[in-house]
Amino acid sequence: MKKYLFLSLLALCTFYSKAQSVSKEKEQSNAEIFSAKSGTLMQKEFLALSNIKNCKIEVLHFTDLITSSKQSGLKFSMDVVTSYSTDTKSAMLDADEIDGLMKSIKLIQEKVLVTTPATYTEVNYRSRSGFEAGCFTSKGSWSCYLKLEKFDGKSYVWINTEDLANLYSILEQAKTKM
């Protein structure tokens, strides 16, 4: 009986660890999937827009030169310097996700940040690639952030309400360049 119980627990732990590793794989935007296709001659065009704190924002245009098919995305990236190396954190938003992010920013500005919740509260927008933009309460006030990579605590960009308004303007500009 003990042997059966041990084997059952071992199988359960193996299943759980495999499920954990699958769920922590980096999610990708449609633009990232398109740009990584094999058997293509891919052209990547980078259009710099602006920065929010230490986060660079640019429009990327991908063109498969063999088929002439195209895809665009909005890239957020920043370098994180440690004592040993520099690591680049990045996220890509598809063109069809920008309107949702813009609507979310407006709702955060007009309906969320004007409240004072009695309990800890989080509000966030999440893209296909795992990018997040949101806010949470801390000691009765709101803190806003961008998070470039879903499972990486070092990919946060802490922003204020002015940065949030600036981000909205950058997104308006990005839409015209997509």
Image: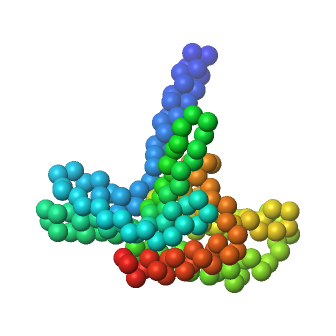
The residue sitting at 51% across, 30% down in the picture is 14
In this rendering, the answer to whether 50 lies above or below 25 is: below
Image coordinates for residue 25, horizontal then vertical, percent: 46, 46
| Residue 92 shown left or right of residue 79 in the figure | left
Q: What color scheme is it?
A: rainbow
Q: Is residue 109 above or below residue 82?
A: below
Q: Give the percent coordinates (x, y) of residue 76.
A: 49, 62
Asked where in the image residue 138 lies, by quadrant, the reply is bottom right
Q: How many marks?
A: 0
Residue drawn 57% across the image and 74% down it: 167
Q: Where is residue 101 shown, x and y percent of the image?
A: 53, 74
User: Residue at horizontal 45%, vertical 49%?
Assistant: 26
126 horizontally vs 177: left or right: right
Where is 19 relative to 143, above or below?
above
Q: Nearer the viewer, residue 60 or 13?
A: 60
Quadrant where the N terminus sits is: top right
Q: Quick one: which residue is furthest to the left in this view?
A: 66
Give the answer, above or below, for where 4 lies relative to 98. above
Residue 140: horizontal and vertical position, in percent?
85, 67
Q: Residue drawn 46% across and 71% down?
A: 49
- Residue 62 visible in the current orientation: yes
- Of residue 85 and residue 22, the one placed in the foreground of this image is 85
Instruction: Decide if residue 23 is in sight here.
Output: no
